[in-house]
Image: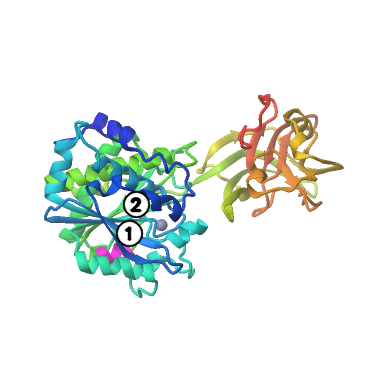
Amino acid sequence: MNLVKEDFIRAFSLYEEKALRYRRFKHADILPLLQGKEISKRFTIEEIGRSVEDRSIFKLKYGQGAIKVLLWSQMHGDEPTATMALFDLFNFFNGEADGFDAFRKVIAEKLTLYFIPMLNPDGAERYQRRTAMDVDMNRDARAVATVEGALLKEQAMLLEPNFAFNLHNQNNYYNIPGTATPVTISLLAPAYDYARSVNEVRADAMRVIVGINKILQEFIPNAVAKYDDEHTPRGFGDNFQKWGASTILIESGAFAGDTEKLEVRKYNFIALLKAFQEIASGSYSVHDIADYNAIPFNDEKLHDVLIRNLSIERNGKKMLVDVGIRQNEKTVVDDYYVEGLIEDIGDLQDFYGYTDLDVEGLQFIPAKLYSERIFSLAKLSPSNVVKLLKQGFAAIRVSDKVDAGMMHSFPIQILTDTHFESRMSPLIGDDADFFIGSDSEIRYALVNGYLIDLKVEMDGKFKNSIL
Ligand SMILES: [Zn+2]
């Protein structure tokens, strides 16, 4: 049974796991799903070990075919998108009487699928890349010092999979070369040696990728790239390829406006389902690896905000520059705040911004802290904030207790002390708090890395600073 575009859309809408809608879910959120009755309908679930902090790590098995496929997700704790997609797949394979029964039957007869979701639960707990012992698990395939990495290697040796899927997230700043399009999914058949040789094992991974790319192009044309193919002797993907499993890296990337990556998650689900179909039917074998080579490599030229042709001045000397700004997420316990930082200053003609603005004729205006009075957050109104912004104040003092989430919920910097640095011109690494305008008028505010057009009226509510 050959699934086409409409089938993939329908399958996802039927089986998306609604309990996982926010990126920062933790082990405790997936545990009830793994221990529930429904999931074990067609899956065999086994605890294969525990993390350093004693969180359970599970392996799920579906099907009884001769071709073994091993997939693992979230060996980097802050890369959760594929974990979401795996739970969508578990729901899909447990479904019935929906028109997909024949497809499921073929998959179960031809393949045995093994899934290890959230391989780094301690990292997920902190929303950090590394394990609780601060080791990058994807640089531990050779030393195998981490208990979690050892579990993965143990499964590799035990199962000897024919195909392997290493599931990650890449940052939001990768673009398709020469375009402002963010890379939504990037793919790679990792190299097993420095020469990047292609044996039949790696060639098969490339062929499966050609199949995945074909279906993804129907959804996200020109938003699929290849990940850097330099050989990483410590990496798991590279080693699985060396151990004889045709290994495919899938990196969940970015889709404009998709903060929680629910669109990207859908393309992950589709990519994996398509891969299972290609492998089960053997259809991948006719694909040409020239089509793999033709997929462009990731470029990395995106910023969250790019201001073009800004006039800046120091010591009476004026110059015209572009300014690139990135909004970094800082985790604080179970919450996070956004820290907008100036990332680059100069000729950024070949770069792009999710928000991209040419301000030719306008100049940099330093931001000020409003220190006349101390505000109460509860009473802060949008019109007050706009009034302050229009007068060049980018920060206020408040009397309330401020938590991390609040720090990026208001389109003005919320301070509980008087610590606010005002610069006469932008500096790399500084907080992106400044104004843009002419001698007579302030036209735009940059607050915490978010661009605010002061000519656009706010509709009475603060909307997460993105106005
Ligand atoms: Zn990763």
Between disc 2 and disc 1, the foreground one is 2
Are the two marked residues, 2 and 1, in contact with CB atoms closer than 8 angstroms? yes
Mark 1 residue CB less than 8 A from any atom of ligand 1: no
Task: State the separation of the CA atoms marked 2 and 1.
Answer: 8 Å
| Residue on which disc 2 sits | 34
Residue 380 pos. (x, y %): 76, 34
- Which numbered circle lies on residue 58? 1
Asked if residue 389 lies in the magenta stretch, the reply is no
Q: Which amino acid, mark 1?
A: Phe
Residue 50 pos. (x, y %): 38, 66
- Specify the quadrant that holds the C terminus: top right
Residue farthest to the front, as pictured:
37
Whether 72 is drawn above or below 3: the answer is: below
Front residue of this view, candidates 188 and 13: 13
Relative horizontal placement of residue 158, taking residue 334 as reference (left or right): left
Ligand 1's quadrant: bottom left
Whether 49 is drawn above or below 288: the answer is: below
Whether 2 is drawn above or below 82: the answer is: above
Disc 2 crowd rating (10 Å Cα; few below 14, some 14-19, many 20+) is some
How many discs mark residues in the rendered view? 2
Q: Which amino acid, mark 2?
A: Leu
Mark 2 and mark 1 lie on one chain; the one further toward the N terminus is 2
The answer to whether residue 163 is visible is: yes
Q: Quadrant of residue 2?
A: top left
Mark 2 residue CB less than 8 A from any atom of ligand 1: no
- Write the start and end of the magenta stretch as one range: 236-240
Front residue of this view, candidates 321 and 338: 338
Residue farthest to the right, as pictured:
372
Q: Quadrant of residue 454?
A: top right
Disc 1 crowd rating (10 Å Cα; few below 14, some 14-19, many 20+) is some
